[in-house]
Each structure stands twice: as structure tokens, then as C-alpha cells.
Image (cartoon, rainbow, N blue to C red):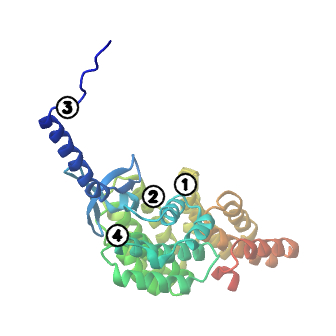
């Protein structure tokens, strides 16, 4: 008969194992608290404990080491324990899927959010989604601007401050108050990141130009042109600042030179840059129309319409200008088609109300 030997562990070894088990069980809540996540614009997400958030950076501790992310390189932040509806809304916004984000946002139970960080993000998303839709002509810019203004009052040092400042400026332009927009864009222009600083100064120039403050606008554009820059985003805004100066000069009686300069920029530019080329073609269309060259102006605006429709604000303007030009040229049906397209795509846009 086989005799089974006792499988009992020595008492000292047993105590050691039990102690280890209790240690790991006791440490689980601590580990759970360290499962925040930072999703950078480039690269993989980082999991750890967020130890600092400011206007300019997010710091996350990973196994005792801090990793620093400049705020302009942070796509989104998720917190341990946040509801899936909030996480999915952030993801959809980051992907630009706003209609889906609206539906997911409606599912969030704001009253049950367990932390101030989540409540802050909820209020930001509320204003940001409303504002982005308003810029696309699908919402009230004044209402969205109010939501973001209230959010910034309480969260001026948030890592989301710069996108909020830019959107507030865009909404002020859409609401017909470009002088106010210049102040909001000033928040973007104070960023320590060259591409945001450059973009902010350019947008300030655009807003000042819309406010008929040409000398101040030119000064902002010239500031952008004079900056020693090398990153691709800043270089693009230098080209757009040059367009701004051309527009200012044209309003001072130099339209013929302006058309030639713009046509040269079209010939030499990268037509895959939708933001730049929509700006170029709309500005060129304006100059040509002012010079009485209506057929050429129509062709320029049609390029924005047909090639750069993803640029919602320039596209809405191009459709409005096409409506005017077709009417002036006696093409009533084409004018009606352009107007119908404008109203369908951008029902709440300021261009519809003009």
C-alpha cells in the first residue's frame, strides 16, 4: 500500500505566504488609484497616477518616475473609475466624430461623477462639443461661447485652456464680435509652444482685420512673419499671415498687386493643405470680385466649394459669395443652388443670416 506523505507546509513557510498574500490584497486599492491614463497626440497611452495638471503640462507618475507631457501634445486624459460614457465621449471628440459624441454625452450622469477632475472634463466637453458644432453652422455660437466662458473662469489653468481659448475666439467671430475674438485669441498667443503662439497671433490679426483695425492687424501679421520658426505648423501660419497682409494692403488700394501675389502663392503652395488653400482661394475670389473679374472670382470660390469643403467656415463663406456672384451674373438657378447648399450644410452659420 502506498503511504501518502503529508503535504502540509512548515509553519514558518505558511506564515510567510499568508503575509505575502495579505500584503498584495492590502495593496490593491493603492494600485487601483494609479490607473489614470494619458493619451498623447503621438505614441502609446501611458498608465499611472496623474500628479500634476497645468495650462502647459500634464505629469503622470509611472512606477515611481514622472513623465511630462506638454499640454499641446495631450490628446485626452482618462481617470481611474470614470464612467465608460465619459471615456467614450472623450474618444469620439478626439476622433472628430461629433454627432456620435453628442449622443454619448447625453448618457453621462453628471450628478454621479465621482471626482472634481471628471466634473471639470464634463463641463469642458459640454462647451467644446456645442462650440465645435456651432462653428460648423449647427448650433448657437453665443450659447456655446457662454458655456466655455463660464468654464474658463473656473479652470483657467487647465491643460485644456488653449483649445478652449481658440474655440472661444472662433465663436466670437461667428457671433459677429471679432473685436472680442481678438482678446480670446490672445490666450492662445501667450502659449509657450511656438505653433500655438504663431496661430494665436495670426488669428488675432484676422479678428482685428474683421474689426476694420487694419494697422493693428498688420502688426500682428508682421509679428508672425518676423518670428524665427522652423516647425511646419508655424511655417504654414506665416504663409497665412502673408495672405492677411495682402488683404490689408488691398483694402488700402493695392488690389492689382495683391492678386498677382496670391496667384503666385497658389502656384508655389502645397494644395493638400486645406486650411491654407481655402484661405487662399477665398481671398483671391474676393480680390477678383472687387476688380470686377466676376467669372474668375466664381472659379476661385468654386475651388473652395469643391476641393476644400471640409473647412467649414471658409466653405460657408464661399457658398455665400457664390450666391451673390451668380445672382449678379444672371444665373438665378446656380445662385439658388448655392444658397440651398449653404442653408443645408450650415443652417445656423452667420453666412446664412447675411
Percent coordinates x, y for residue 150 in the rendering: 42, 85
Residue 85 is left or right of residue 293, and the answer is left
Question: Which label sits on residue 273?
Answer: 1
Disc 4 versus disc 3: nearer the observer: 3
Residue 74 is left or right of residue 302, and the answer is left
Question: Which label sits on residue 173?
Answer: none
Mark closer to the chain start, 1 or 3: 3
Percent coordinates x, y for residue 143 in the rendering: 55, 86
The residue that appears at 41% across and 53% down in the rendered structure is: 41
Residues at discs 2 and 1 in contact (Cβ within 8 Å): yes
User: In the picture shown, does residue 289 fall above or below 91?
Assistant: below
Q: In what element is the residue under mark 4?
A: helix
Q: Which residue is mark 2?
A: 236
The residue that appears at 48% across and 74% down in the rendered structure is: 167
Q: Which residue is mark 4?
A: 223
Q: Looking at the image, can residue 182 be seen?
A: yes
Q: Which residue is mark 3?
A: 9
Disc 1 versus disc 4: nearer the observer: 1
Among all residues in the image, which is located at the extreme left? 12
Q: How many marks?
A: 4
The residue that appears at 17% across and 45% down in the rendered structure is: 19
Mark closer to the chain start, 4 or 3: 3
Residue 176 is left or right of residue 111, and the answer is right
Please rate how many residues cluster around mark 4, counting C-alpha atoms within 10 Å: few if below 14, some from 14 to 19, many from 20: some
Amino acid at each position: 500500500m502506498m503511504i501518502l506523505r503529508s503535504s502540509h507546509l512548515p509553519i514558518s513557510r505558511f506564515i510567510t505566504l499568508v503575509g505575502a498574500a495579505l500584503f498584495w490584497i492590502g495593496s490593491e486599492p493603492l494600485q487601483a488609484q494609479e490607473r489614470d491614463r494619458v493619451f498623447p497626440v503621438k505614441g502609446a497611452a501611458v498608465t499611472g497616477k496623474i500628479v500634476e495638471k497645468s495650462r502647459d503640462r500634464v505629469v503622470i507618475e509611472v512606477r515611481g518616475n514622472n513623465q511630462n507631457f506638454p499640454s499641446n501634445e495631450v490628446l485626452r486624459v482618462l481617470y481611474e473609475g470614470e464612467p465608460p460614457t465619459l471615456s467614450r465621449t472623450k474618444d469620439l471628440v478626439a476622433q472628430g466624430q461629433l454627432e456620435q459624441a453628442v449622443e454619448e454625452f447625453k448618457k453621462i450622469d453628471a450628478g454621479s461623477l465621482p471626482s472634481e477632475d471628471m466634473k471639470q472634463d464634463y463641463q469642458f466637453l459640454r462647451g467644446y462639443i456645442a462650440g465645435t458644432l456651432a462653428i460648423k453652422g449647427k448650433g448657437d455660437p453665443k450659447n456655446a461661447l457662454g458655456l466655455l466662458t463660464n468654464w474658463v473662469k473656473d479652470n483657467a489653468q487647465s491643460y485644456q485652456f488653449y483649445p478652449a481659448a481658440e474655440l472661444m475666439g472662433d465663436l466670437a467671430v461667428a457671433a459677429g464680435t471679432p473685436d472680442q475674438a481678438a482678446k480670446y485669441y490672445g490666450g492662445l498667443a501667450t502659449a509657450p509652444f511656438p505653433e500655438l503662439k504663431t496661430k494665436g497671433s495670426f488669428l488675432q490679426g484676422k479678428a482685428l482685420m474683421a474689426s476694420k483695425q487694419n494697422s493693428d492687424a498688420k502688426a500682428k501679421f508682421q509679428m508672425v512673419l518676423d518670428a524665427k520658426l522652423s516647425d511646419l505648423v508655424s511655417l504654414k501660419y506665416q504663409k497665412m499671415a502673408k495672405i492677411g497682409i495682402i488683404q490689408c494692403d488691398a483694402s488700402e488700394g493695392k488690389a492689382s498687386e495683391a492678386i498677382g501675389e496670391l496667384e503666385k502663392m497658389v502656384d508655389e503652395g502645397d494644395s493638400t493643405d486645406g486650411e491654407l488653400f481655402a484661405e487662399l482661394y477665398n481671398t483671391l475670389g474676393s480680390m477678383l470680385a472687387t476688380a470686377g473679374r466676376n467669372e474668375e472670382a466664381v472659379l476661385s470660390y468654386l475651388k473652395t466649394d469643391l476641393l476644400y469643403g471640409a473647412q467649414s467656415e471658409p466653405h460657408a463663406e464661399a457658398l455665400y459669395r457664390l450666391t451673390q456672384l451668380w445672382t449678379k451674373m444672371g444665373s438665378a438657378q446656380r445662385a439658388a443652388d448655392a444658397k440651398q447648399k449653404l442653408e443645408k450644410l450650415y443652417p445656423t452659420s452667420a453666412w446664412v443670416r447675411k
